[in-house]
């Protein structure tokens, strides 16, 4: 019998343990939920003890699972870091940038041509995920986030600017004068990932959040903004992600934008000294300010 577990099975377990979900592990590794489950089961059969236990509708690690997660996470983190360093030395590795799918579609992709023209030596590999990255930024050289501190101790964080959010809607919903009170009579749209956004905006605007009706929430910001463009209601959104729609008249922002406690940041592993990350951070900060 081998004194090492099969690498595919260990990789599947490590992802499931780190993400706390077999489904999320399957998404990250681009395999089926069943494949992750079979890999984990093969490890449990080889060890003779369970690695996960059911708790309600979720999974928790057993004592054996915790021990294996600690060892495998450390090993894979070191392997990823060493592999990235070796590839950078060979000049063959693109910079892997992670961000949410909505941010990728609404803000990053429209700027790729300009990024290529202004930073021609930078080759990006874009990785979209709706799950925030773990402290080890597994598989990523850097991540572009819209989030609030504190940040993990092992990160190097480039602060790109404060977030501004505001209500946006299709011009077809416009009414004369558009007083703020109109919001109480219009359908509000939000996202499940950020249910407090309307309340944050109301308080920053000097309003009582309780006067606003409950919002219809969408799974992703991308869907939310398309619903607003279609005239289904008033969406609450970060200013940079609707700048193009405001400029071309697809959306209007009659109540303006307010600052929140969230920050636009580019983060990387503190041990990653790749100078391309510094260059990308400077470019992103400029784009967020002037575009």
Image (cartoon, rainbow, N blue to C red):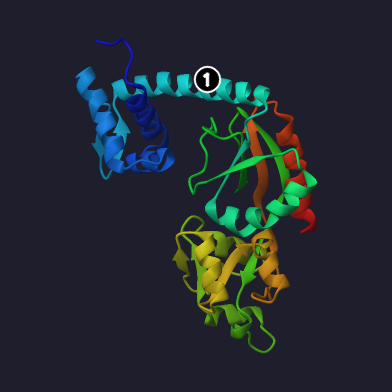
**Helix or strand or loop: what does disc 1 sit on?**
helix
111 vs 53, left or right, is: right
Tell me the residue that label 1 is attached to. 78
Q: Name the quadrant containing residue 62.
A: top left
Q: Residue 205 at what x, y percent from top left?
A: 67, 67
Q: Residue 157 at what x, y percent from top left?
A: 68, 36
Give the crowd class for mark 1: few <14, some 14-19, many >=20 residues within 10 Å.
Answer: few
Q: Is residue 3 above or below residue 168?
A: above
Report if residue 248 is visible in the image.
Answer: yes
Q: Residue 129 at what x, y percent from top left?
A: 50, 47
Q: Is residue 67 above or below residue 274?
A: above
Residue displayed at 59% across by 84% down: 173
* Nearer-the-camera pick, 211 or 24: 24
* Nearer-the-camera pick, 199 or 174: 174
3 vs 206, left or right, is: left
Residue displayed at 46% across by 64% down: 218
Quarter of the image that includes the C terminus? bottom right
Q: Residue 21 at what x, y percent from top left?
A: 35, 40
- Considering every residue shown, the one lying at the far bottom of the view is 176
């Amino acid at each position: 019998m081998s004194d090492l577990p099969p690498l595919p099975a260990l990789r599947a377990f490590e992802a499931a343990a780190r993400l706390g979900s077999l489904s999320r592990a399957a998404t990250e590794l681009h395999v089926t939920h069943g494949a992750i489950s079979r890999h984990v089961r093969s490890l449990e059969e080889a060890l003779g003890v369970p690695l996960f236990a059911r708790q309600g509708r979720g999974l928790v690690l057993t004592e054996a699972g915790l021990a294996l997660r600690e060892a495998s996470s450390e090993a894979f983190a070191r392997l990823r870091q060493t592999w990235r360093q070796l590839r950078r030395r060979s000049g063959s590795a693109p910079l892997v940038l992670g961000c949410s799918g909505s941010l990728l579609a609404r803000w990053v992709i429209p700027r790729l041509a300009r990024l290529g023209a202004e930073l021609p030596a930078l080759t990006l590999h874009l990785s979209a995920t709706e799950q925030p990255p773990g402290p080890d930024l597994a598989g990523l050289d850097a991540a572009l986030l819209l989030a609030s501190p504190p940040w993990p101790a092992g990160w190097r964080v480039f602060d790109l600017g404060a977030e501004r959010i505001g209500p946006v809607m299709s011009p077809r919903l416009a009414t004369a004068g558009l007083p703020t009170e109109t919001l109480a009579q219009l359908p509000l749209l939000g996202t499940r990932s950020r249910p407090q956004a309307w309340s944050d905006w109301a308080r920053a605007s000097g309003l009582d959040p309780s006067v606003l009706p409950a919002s219809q929430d969408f799974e992703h910001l991308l869907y939310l903004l398309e619903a607003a463009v279609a005239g289904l209601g008033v969406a609450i959104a970060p200013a940079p992600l609707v700048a193009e729609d405001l400029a071309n008249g697809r959306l209007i922002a009659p109540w303006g934008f307010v600052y929140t406690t969230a920050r636009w940041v580019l983060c990387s592993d503190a041990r990653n000294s790749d100078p391309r990350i510094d260059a990308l951070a400077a470019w992103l900060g400029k784009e967020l300010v002037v575009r």
